[in-house]
Image (cartoon, coloured by chain):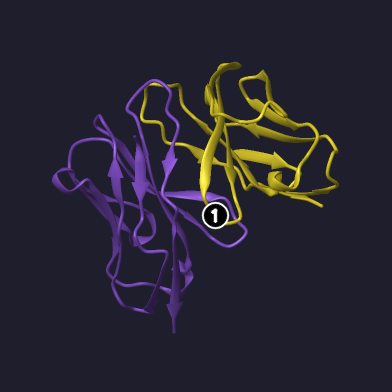
Amino acid sequence: AQSVTQPDIHITVSEGASLELRCNYSYGATPYLFWYVQSPGQGLQLLLKYFSGDTLVQGIKGFEAEFKRSQSSFNLRKPSVHWSDAAEYFCAVSGPGGYNKLIFGAGTRLAVHP
Amino acid sequence: DTAVSQTPKYLVTQMGNDKSIKCEQNLGHDTMYWYKQDSKKFLKIMFSYNNKELIINETVPNRFSPKSPDKAHLNLHINSLELGDSAVYFCASSPRTGTNNEQFFGPGTRLTVL
């Protein structure tokens, strides 16, 4: 069955510290992978996506993610976190064609301490 | 310019009532979606339409009826509202199926059933 696991429900980091949010997926075919961010009371904004090619992808707001097929992972990273990064982060997977529903992980809530 | 818009943003109603949520996208996309986010922030696909044709219907009670009058609009009508329907409903759109499936989300409609 297709699924996405985000092992960390809550993460707290200090402003300026580095960040890594974990995402593991289960998908029968080659997946398309996404990270979305949801600020309180807001909709979802796409941070970055992976379809093929270079396994290290760059996104908006200084985020990057690395696709590791052998580990079925797509972890999100940022070298230096800003207080405005506090939000809920969702990893998602979809198929490369046909009925392209997004399957989401449960989300990771990021808190940033000053 | 708002890419994906939803109305209303908030909806408070009594059990047993019928209500509708409207969604419009001005991105020229062919595919539109409804997702439900529950109180634990978990996001799950409900429906998807491609060019006004239903292509995904994920075991949603038949009290929920999507309607797509044209490919820029996807409305969600809910009959006989129940307490468990309280959630945030997100509309999304993407280019035609079979492409990269980057989905653009609306701001959400928070439905509260009393």
Q: Position of residue A4 (x, y in %)?
A: 36, 46
Q: In this picture, is B80 found above or below B68?
A: below
Chain A colour? Answer: purple
- Identity of the amino acid at label 1? Lys
Q: Residue at x 41, y 73 (%)?
A: A82
Q: Is residue A102 visible?
A: yes
Q: Which residue is mark 1?
A: B41
Q: Residue at x 22, y 35 (%)?
A: A52
User: Mark 1 Cα within 10 Å, few/some/many (few <14, many 20+)?
Assistant: some
- From where the camera sits, is residue B1 visible? no
User: Is A110 above or below relative to B102?
Assistant: below
Residue for point 66% across, 26% down: B73
Whether residue B45 sits left or right of residue B100 in the image: it is right
| Position of residue B11 measured from the top left corner of the image (x, y, whole percent) | 78, 48
Name the chain letter of the residue that bears numbered label 1: B
Compare residues B40 and A89 and report the one nearer the observer.
B40
Residue B29 horizontal/vertical position (percent):
52, 26
**Residue A30 falls in which quadrant of the image?**
top left
From the image, state the color of chain B. yellow
**Residue found farthest to the bottom:** A114
Q: Is residue A3 above or below residue A14?
A: above
